[in-house]
Amino acid sequence: MEHSFRQQFNVLTTSEPNQALSWIDEDREDKIAIVVSDQWMPSVTGLTLMQLIKKRKPQILRYLVTAK
């Protein structure tokens, strides 16, 4: 997916929820518009991550997916 969108958009990828939250907190110009996350991650669930994002920046669209 990253390769498909990178030509039109700035795509950030990480497998670490804390890194994603750091990017969101540092995004002073509100350039992050969409977050796509898996439900199953090592440190927190995707649902928890989405709730934390919503508290910080409710305008960000959030998509939660899972392969299970």
Image: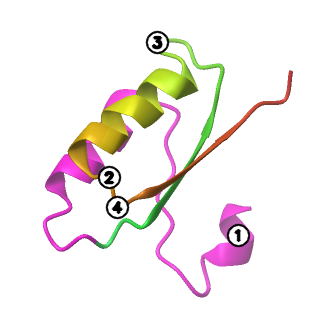
Q: Residue at x 34, y 61 (%)?
A: 59
The kind of residue tagged 3 is Ser
Question: Do the CB atoms of the residues marked 1 and 3 lie less than 8 Å apart?
Answer: no
The residue beneath circle 2 is: 58
- Label 1 Cα neighbours within 10 Å, binned few <14 / some 14-19 / many ≥20: few
Tell me the magenta residue range: 1-30
Nearer the N terminus, badge 1 or badge 4?
1
Q: How far is mark 1 from mark 3, CA to CA?
A: 26 Å
Observer-nearest residue: 12 or 63?
Answer: 63
User: Residue 57, image x and y in percent?
Assistant: 27, 52
Q: Secondary structure at mark 4?
A: loop
The residue beneath circle 3 is: 43
Q: Residue at x 36, y 65 (%)?
A: 32
User: Residue 20, image x and y in percent?
Assistant: 37, 42
Quarter that holds the N terminus: bottom right
The residue beneath circle 1 is: 3
Observer-nearest residue: 50 or 6?
Answer: 50
The residue beneath circle 4 is: 59
Q: Nearer the viewer, mark 1 or mark 3?
A: 3
Horizontally, residue 26 falls left or right of residue 13, namely left
**Residue 28 counted in the magenta span:** yes
User: Residue 22, image x and y in percent?
Assistant: 24, 42
